[in-house]
Image (spheres, helix red, strand yellow):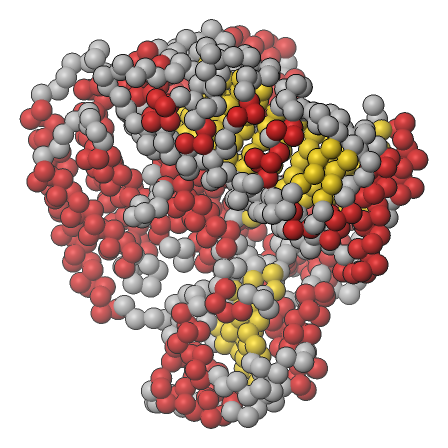
């Protein structure tokens, strides 16, 4: 649904012009009102009518394309005028030409509105839910493999001692095997004997309450009444189920709404009745969060078992096909639907090595194109029934390479810059982006790949088959264009993905005159390794290009997003002298050549949201005038770039109220002027390499940042009066790289008293007394604690477990004098892991003792795990290893 995202983006443009303190252009009030009315109407139409049920697919596609093209034209007129007026080198267009051009676009949009009204009138009588498909038409007989543990878990819930009526949600992505598991339970002999009544109904997205009730009534009682009302059916069902032990399976539920409408007709007989719900949505918590069963991908052994049973039945796999077969299975990434589909295809085909190799090399495209009615349809349903506001965000996932670990923070910044997010009063765009991301995870379309130290999602992925489905929708909706040819023709695409690092050249960029977003989708390390395999001539050309300059052509003046560098990575450096002439940019992420110099005209980037740059040139003071800026991130080196403090004498003071991230800046004096300029900052990463900052305490006003949640401070040298630092009470994450002379006894009480602090890391510094004693009620919210190389600590004293009541992870690094980890740590109920790296033997043995004591208390239910890393010189410590105590030897 590309048109919906375009409408949302366009309204952002109008809002930005109206709310900006010094807008680059003005628009006639009447034109603004007309545009707003039309766009609002079209958004309502897309929400209410554009669906496979209401409007014919081809007609919907045609309307969407026409809507998108009209909005694109309106964007171009407005943004072209903005750029022309900002760019002093270009002649300024007379105002009446702009208004006339905009009026032509409005007239076209009015014509579209009339056509849409006609379609809406014709479609309105058809707006009624489609009857839910019955089990007889949708249930496909499959082999169930690799779900034995889950099967037994659900079976235990079905036949357990809980007498009250219980709902058991089975969740997982499309094709994971939810329906197969439910069918196996439904047909199980013990289940048949245990329940008096069993009924199965498929809900689907377009459910019909009456048809759902009629199906359950028919399966439960054999009554096929079709001429009674919804209420009468419900009453009939209630009477029939009353007093009996029943099992009802509701397959493929997409919303809790259907349950809310029919739950009154399922009596709680206090006899162990059960209702199983299968759903792709992991966030239907209203059903029963405590009894939810999440289905995961199959492991290697079970994947192979399912494949063999699907292809060969009871026979074993011939030896000559085993290696190819296992390669095919590995590519399926544990998704039963993919394994079963490709296995079914192979089972019906000739058993020749050539054919199997063909399948191996074209697996996903074959799975998607073959068996369309079962495989692609199953996956595509998850996309079709996404809310419109999520569709653009999901399609954007296809931008990234197959198997790419996608940094979630970067993804959300890109969503914001592309303006996919529907604004909500009282919520920041970052909050909305996080909600969208959680919803995609909850719908099992996006997979969590790596969690942070306190449980936040740092990286995500999508399954290969889901990605292929995504790319098909991208192509259909013309959402973006992937460029792989290094000599492209002129393209009219507005969003372009460069599939190779070699494509970021002046010649290629010149061909992208219509581009509004350029996303570089490549891994620099992979590109370099590819170059090593090239012939000498190609390698030499690439080196010449690396040292050359990439000129951004003037026809890219309307570019909004340029993503050519990922924060925290080692990327290729470019000589983009004119990159800051692109005054329409919302998002800029690039690694710049060491000779690059910031222009003082950087403040002309009136609409810039995110600036991520790796460079070495000091930042110009004009950067304090970027009103819209939300994220300012620099990665020049470990210790940051210098940023001049703003001047209080500046007559054109801009309060950067949107700025949330300031990262990679060194020697910044947090005086009253800085605090006034960036009052809402949430993340600060600062470094200091001077003992005194012009006689001022550089962190004197730190506590004034009332919304600061994440603070990193690197002290290369001792800062005068560091012990007077006052931290804001809003802090949730704190990381300190201390100077060797920093006395930690001065800091720890202040840090321990922070009420919201969840993550604390400190490296270096020293304990002058050799003792750290936490006092009562310290670290009340801390989940993650990492102490690294804090010299001098011998005695760590915790008098009560209430000092770290919710601690989950403890990491200690390079402690060679610590006598022991306090035994009270073992009494913290939430503690899940302890990691010791290069600590002395007594500390390691105290960790072992904590594990042993917990094993005595909890036995096999023990959740605490200890990981110890030691050098070869202390190899003997490996004898301490046990089930929950892992020792890794490190060569030094």
Please state if 693 lies on the left or on the right of 586 as rendered.
right
Which residue sits at x=14%, y=39%? 32
Which residue sits at x=78%, y=41%? 821
Residue 219 in view here: no
- Residue 44, compared with residue 879, is above or below; it is below
Q: Quadrant of residue 129?
A: bottom left
- Residue 310, compared with residue 463, is above or below; it is below
- Residue 595, compared with residue 432, is above or below; it is above
Residue 694 image position (x, y, % from top left): 46, 10
Please state if 317 lies on the left or on the right of 526 as rendered.
right
Q: Nearer the viewer, residue 149 or 839?
A: 839
Q: Quadrant of residue 848?
A: top right
Residue 6 image position (x, y, % from top left): 29, 41
- Residue 225, compared with residue 458, is above or below; it is below
Residue 379 image position (x, y, % from top left): 50, 55
Please state if 334 lies on the left or on the right of 871 as rendered.
left
Residue 554 image position (x, y, % from top left): 30, 16
Viewport quadrant of the C terminus: top right
Q: Nearer the viewer, residue 395 or 667?
A: 667
């Amino acid at each position: 649904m590309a048109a919906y995202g375009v409408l949302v983006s366009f309204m952002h443009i109008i809002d930005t012009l109206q709310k900006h303190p010094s807008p680059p252009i003005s628009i006639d009030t009447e034109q603004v009102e007309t545009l707003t009315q039309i766009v609002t109407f079209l958004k309502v139409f897309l929400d209410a009518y554009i669906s496979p049920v209401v409007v014919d697919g081809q007609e919907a596609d045609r309307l969407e394309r026409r809507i998108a093209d009209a909005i694109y034209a309106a964007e171009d007129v407005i943004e072209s005028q903005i750029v022309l007026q900002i760019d002093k080198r270009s002649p300024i267009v007379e105002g009446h030409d702009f208004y006339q051009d905009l009026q032509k676009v409005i007239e076209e949009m009015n014509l579209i509105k009339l056509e849409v009204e006609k379609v809406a009138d014709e479609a309105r009588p058809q707006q009624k839910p489609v009857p839910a498909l019955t089990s007889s038409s949708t249930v496909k007989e499959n082999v169930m493999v690799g779900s034995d543990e889950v099967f037994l878990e659900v079976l235990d819930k079905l036949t357990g001692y809980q007498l009250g009526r219980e709902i058991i949600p089975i969740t997982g992505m499309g094709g994971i095997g939810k329906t197969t598991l439910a069918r196996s339970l439904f047909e199980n002999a013990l289940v048949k004997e245990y329940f008096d009544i069993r009924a199965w109904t498929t809900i689907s997205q377009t459910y019909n309450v009456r048809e759902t009730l009629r199906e359950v009534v028919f399966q439960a009682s054999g009554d096929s009444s079709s001429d009674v009302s919804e209420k009468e059916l419900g009453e009939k069902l209630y009477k029939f189920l009353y007093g009996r032990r029943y099992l009802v399976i509701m397959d493929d539920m997409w919303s809790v709404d259907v349950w809310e409408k029919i739950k009154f007709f399922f009596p709680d007989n206090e006899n162990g009745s059960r209702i199983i719900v299968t759903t792709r949505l992991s966030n239907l918590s209203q059903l029963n969060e405590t009894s939810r069963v999440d289905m995961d991908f199959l492991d290697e052994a079970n994947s192979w078992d399912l494949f063999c049973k699907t292809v060969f039945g009871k026979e074993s796999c011939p030896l000559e096909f085993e290696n190819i077969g296992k390669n095919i299975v590995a590519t399926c990434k544990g998704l039963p639907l993919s394994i079963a589909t490709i296995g079914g295809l192979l089972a019906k085909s000739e058993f020749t090595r050539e054919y199997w190799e063909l399948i191996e090399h074209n697996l996903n495209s074959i799975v998607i194109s073959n068996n369309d009615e079962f495989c692609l349809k199953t996956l595509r349903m998850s996309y079709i029934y996404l809310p419109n506001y999520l569709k653009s965000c999901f399609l954007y996932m296809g931008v990234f390479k197959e198997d790419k670990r996608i940094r979630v923070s970067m993804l959300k910044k890109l969503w914001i810059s592309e303006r996919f997010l529907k604004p909500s009063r009282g919520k920041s765009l970052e909050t909305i982006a996080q909600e969208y991301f959680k919803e995609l995870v909850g719908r099992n379309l996006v997979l969590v790949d790596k969690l942070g130290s306190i449980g936040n999602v740092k990286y995500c992925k999508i399954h290969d088959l889901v990605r292929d489905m995504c790319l098909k929708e991208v192509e259909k909706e013309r959402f973006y264009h992937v460029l792989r040819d290094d000599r492209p023709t002129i393209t009219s695409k507005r969003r372009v993905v460069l599939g190779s690092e070699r494509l970021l050249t002046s010649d290629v960029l010149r061909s992208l005159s219509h581009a509004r977003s350029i996303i570089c989708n490549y891994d620099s390390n992979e590109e370099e390794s590819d170059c090593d395999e090239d012939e000498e001539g190609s390698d030499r050309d690439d080196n010449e290009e690396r040292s050359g300059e990439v000129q951004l052509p003037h026809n890219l003046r309307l570019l909004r997003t340029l993503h050519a560098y990922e924060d925290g990575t080692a990327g290729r450096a470019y000589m983009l002298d004119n990159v800051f002439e692109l005054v329409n940019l919302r998002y800029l992420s690039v690694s710049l050549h060491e000779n690059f110099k910031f222009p003082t005209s950087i403040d002309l980037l009136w609409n810039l949201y995110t600036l991520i740059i790796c460079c070495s040139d000091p930042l110009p003071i004009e950067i304090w005038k970027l009103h819209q800026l939300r994220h300012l991130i620099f990665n020049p080196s470990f210790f940051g770039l210098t940023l001049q403090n703003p001047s209080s004498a500046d007559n054109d003071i801009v309060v950067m109220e949107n700025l949330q991230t300031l990262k990679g800046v060194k020697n910044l004096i947090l005086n009253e002027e800085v605090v006034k300029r960036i009052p809402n900052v949430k993340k600060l990463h600062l470094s200091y390499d001077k003992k005194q900052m012009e006689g001022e305490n550089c962190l004197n006003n730190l506590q004034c940042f009332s919304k600061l949640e994440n603070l990193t401070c690197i002290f290369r040298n001792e800062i005068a009066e560091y012990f007077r630092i006052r931290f804001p009470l809003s802090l949730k994450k704190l990381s300190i790289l201390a100077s060797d002379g920093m006395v930690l006894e001065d800091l720890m009480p202040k840090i321990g008293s922070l009420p919201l602090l969840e993550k604390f890391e400190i490296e270096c510094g020293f304990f002058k007394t050799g003792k750290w004693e936490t006092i009562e009620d310290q670290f009340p919210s801390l989940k993650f604690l990492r102490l690294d190389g804090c010299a001098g600590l011998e005695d760590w004293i915790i008098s009560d477990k209430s000092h770290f009541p919710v601690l989950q992870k403890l990491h200690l690094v390079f402690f060679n004098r610590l006598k022991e980890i306090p035994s009270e740590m073992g009494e913290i109920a939430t503690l899940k892991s302890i990691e010791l790296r290069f600590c002395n033997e007594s500390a390691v043995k105290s960790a072992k003792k904590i594990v042993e004591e917990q094993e005595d208390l909890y036995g096999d239910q023990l959740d605490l795990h200890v990981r110890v890393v030691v050098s070869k010189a202390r190899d003997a410590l490996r004898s301490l290893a046990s089930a929950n105590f892992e020792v890794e030897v490190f060569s030094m």
